Amino acid sequence: MLSSCILIGLGLSYSLHCGSCVILIGLGLSYSLHCGSCVILIGLGLSYSLHCGSCVILIGLGLSYSLHCGSCVFLVVC
């Protein structure tokens, strides 16, 4: 089931599924306060999580879908 997310701004997004914030570091990386790991943006709409070892599909419109969690996360770019 997809979960909702709250857009905090300032490079942060809050996932109601994980209950944690994600900090967009830049250079194709984002840091999850919940997982404590970086996510590498591979391109072609995919990103790879070093923590989960799974890909995330970037849907567009600031939305990404995690194959691992089965939920959406809003990517906030400031």
Image (cartoon, helix red, strand yellow):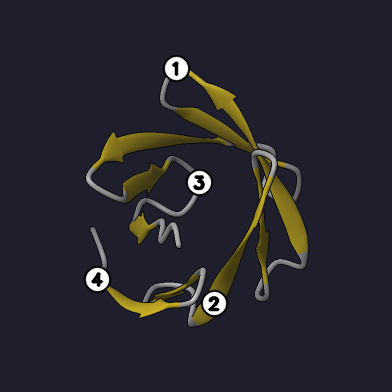
The amino acid on which the numbered mark 1 sits, given as a three-letter code, is Leu
Nearest to N terminus: mark 4 or mark 1 = 4
**Label 1: which residue?**
44
So how many labels did they put on this image? 4
> Which one is earlier in the sequence, the residue at label 3 or at label 2?
2
Nearest the viewer among 70 and 58 is 58
Q: Who comes first in sequence, dot 3 or dot 1?
A: 1
For this orientation, the residue located farthest to the front is 78
- 6 to the left or right of 51: left
Question: Do the residues bearing badges 4 and 1 touch, measured as CB atoms within 8 Å?
Answer: no
Q: Where is residue 28 drawn, in percent x and y?
A: 64, 39
As measured in the structure, the alpha-carbon distance from the residue carrying label 3 to the one carrying label 2 is 17 Å
Task: Please report whichever mark, 2 or 1, sits nearer to the chain's N-terminal start.
Answer: 2
Q: Earlier in the sequence, mark 2 or mark 4?
A: 4
Q: CA distance from mark 2 to mark 4?
A: 13 Å
| In the foreground, 9 or 57 | 9
